Image (cartoon, rainbow, N blue to C red):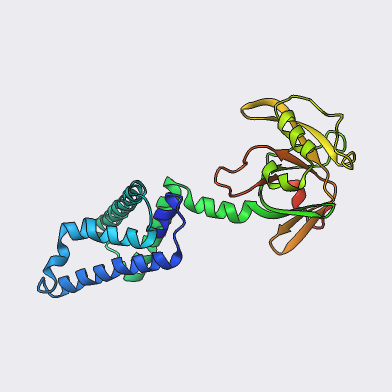
Amino acid sequence: MLWMVGQIASYQPRIRRCIVGGLVGGLFQFGVLMHQASSGLLYPWILSPFLYMVILPGMMLGIVFYPVTLRKMTRLAGYFYLLSFLLAGIHWGIDSLNQRFFRAEIGLGWRFWLHVMFIFVLGELGWGVVHQKVWEQVCLFPVTVCWDEHEVRLTALLDTGNTLTDPLTRHPVVVVELEQFRPWLPPELIRFSQSFFDGEIRGYQDVPEGWEKRFRLLPFHAVGHSGGMMVGFRPDALVVNLRNQTAIHRNVVVALHRSRLSPDGTYQGLIPPAVLTEGGY
């Protein structure tokens, strides 16, 4: 649950910290069970509402997420309490239905796995955490763009809606962030890219020397953008790592996008399904 809170809040906690924080909560729960087993003679202070509702959650969250601002900690605590109350309500509802209608024996093992399942279900329904993790594994690919003596490695998202092709050769187009290539591209190409993206065709005749056969102009349309031009170039090769195999493509065009493609920096490029074929073309 501590790990899920971190995912919901876009905070990546270390697994070791999550384990230690969970152990603190587990030890407290063990103390509660000992108190109940001794008919209240052992640790009477352990049922203090202040300890149970404030001190213990604060210790667990502090162990896992320190250092964070007070505002961030308040947000994390809100997610933690919300998940806790939702899980407690689900378990109470299942027990009530079971006692009234089914009277089935639910063992400790079943309760544990049901608890884990409900955590992931709540995360998926509320924030899509599980879907996000699966999406990252299935749709993100390591890509290497090679030209001359340069190699630029980045992570690309499979974009099934990307049908952009080079108007002249009909080769598929891979869209990448300009910033990933800025140190190795001619200044003229960068200037062209920034102006052509806004539909301002200027300086086309000043193609960088040696780039006459690589240089491409790509018209495009996108949501929220009536249309424009992107500058692109033809690399020597595009290498896509497909888990256990590699696809090498030589007939592709790389389009330079001036803005970030992923708000959180998860990926820096967009690839069409055509470049996922093994063996390349």
Residue at the far front: name it: 187
Q: Is residue 1 visible?
A: no
Q: Residue at x 81, y 33 (%)?
A: 217
Q: Is residue 173 above or below residue 95?
A: above
Q: Position of residue 206 (x, y in %)?
A: 85, 32
The quadrant holding residue 239 is bottom right
Q: Quadrant of the N terminus?
A: bottom left
The residue at 32%/61% (across/down) is 60
Q: Quadrant of residue 278?
A: bottom right
The count of marks equals 0
User: Looking at the image, can residue 84 be seen?
Assistant: yes
Drawn side of residue 42 relative to residue 216, left or right: left
Residue 111 placement (x, y as % from top left):
34, 65
Q: Quadrant of residue 166?
A: top right
Q: Nearer the viewer, residue 130 or 251?
A: 251
Q: Position of residue 95 (x, y in %)?
A: 27, 58
The furthest residue to the left: 41
Q: Residue at x 40, y 65 (%)?
A: 17
Judged left or right of residue 66, residue 165 is right
Task: Say whether residue 3 is left or right of residue 167.
Answer: left
Residue placed most toward the observer, 92 or 69: 69
Residue at 42 percent across and 53 percent down: it is 121
- Residue 117: x and y, percent? 41, 59
